[in-house]
Image: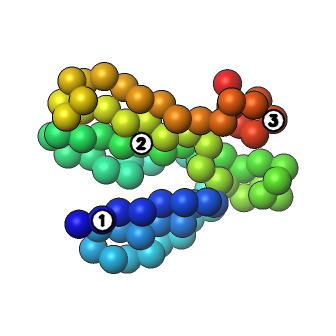
Amino acid sequence: GTCLFWGDPHVQTFDGARPSFYGDGEYWIVKNDNIKIQGRYMGTKYTLGLASTQKVAVSGPFIGNHKIEVEPMQKEFGGA
């Protein structure tokens, strides 16, 4: 199956549902024995306080239990 997520945050789940949520927090996008993907969502001045995807972390046995983190480089956009 396919799971998509983009923007502030919109999601299409593996079963085709399209839930939307706008609160700050960290949520599991995918979590099983082989792959773990977690997203961080926070409000920004550009989204008028509504949460947007700020960071995505990927880990699990499929990549040797290494961790890949993707986030904006600029602090003003939510980066470290």
- Residue hosting label 3: 76
Q: Secondary structure at mark 1?
A: loop
Q: Secondary structure at mark 3?
A: helix
Query: Going from the N terminus, do you reach mark 1 or mark 2 first?
Result: 1
Query: Could you tell me how many numbered marks the image carries?
Result: 3
Is residue 24 visible in the rendered structure shown here? Answer: no
Calculate the distance from the C-alpha at mark 3 to the C-alpha at mark 1.
32 Å
Calculate the distance from the C-alpha at mark 1 to the C-alpha at mark 2.
16 Å
Q: Residues within 10 Å of mark 1 (few under 14, many from 20)?
A: few
Q: Residues within 10 Å of mark 3 (few under 14, many from 20)?
A: few
* 7 relative to 31, above or below: below
Q: Nearer the viewer, mark 1 or mark 2?
A: 1
- Residue hosting label 2: 38
Q: Are marks 1 and 2 in contact (CB under 8 Å)?
A: no
- Residue hosting label 1: 2
Residue for point 17% across, 39% down: 34
Residue 11 locus on image (x, y percent): 47, 66
Residue for point 41% across, 70% down: 12
Quarter holding the C terminus is top right
Is residue 76 visible in the rendered structure shown here? Answer: yes
Q: Nearer the viewer, mark 3 or mark 2?
A: 3
Kind of residue indicated by mark 1: Thr
Q: Nearer the viewer, mark 3 or mark 1?
A: 1
Which is more toward the observer, 51 or 11? 11
Residue 38 locus on image (x, y percent): 41, 42
Quarter holding the N terminus is bottom left
Q: Is residue 27 left or right of residue 73?
A: left
Q: Is residue 35 left or right of residue 48?
A: left
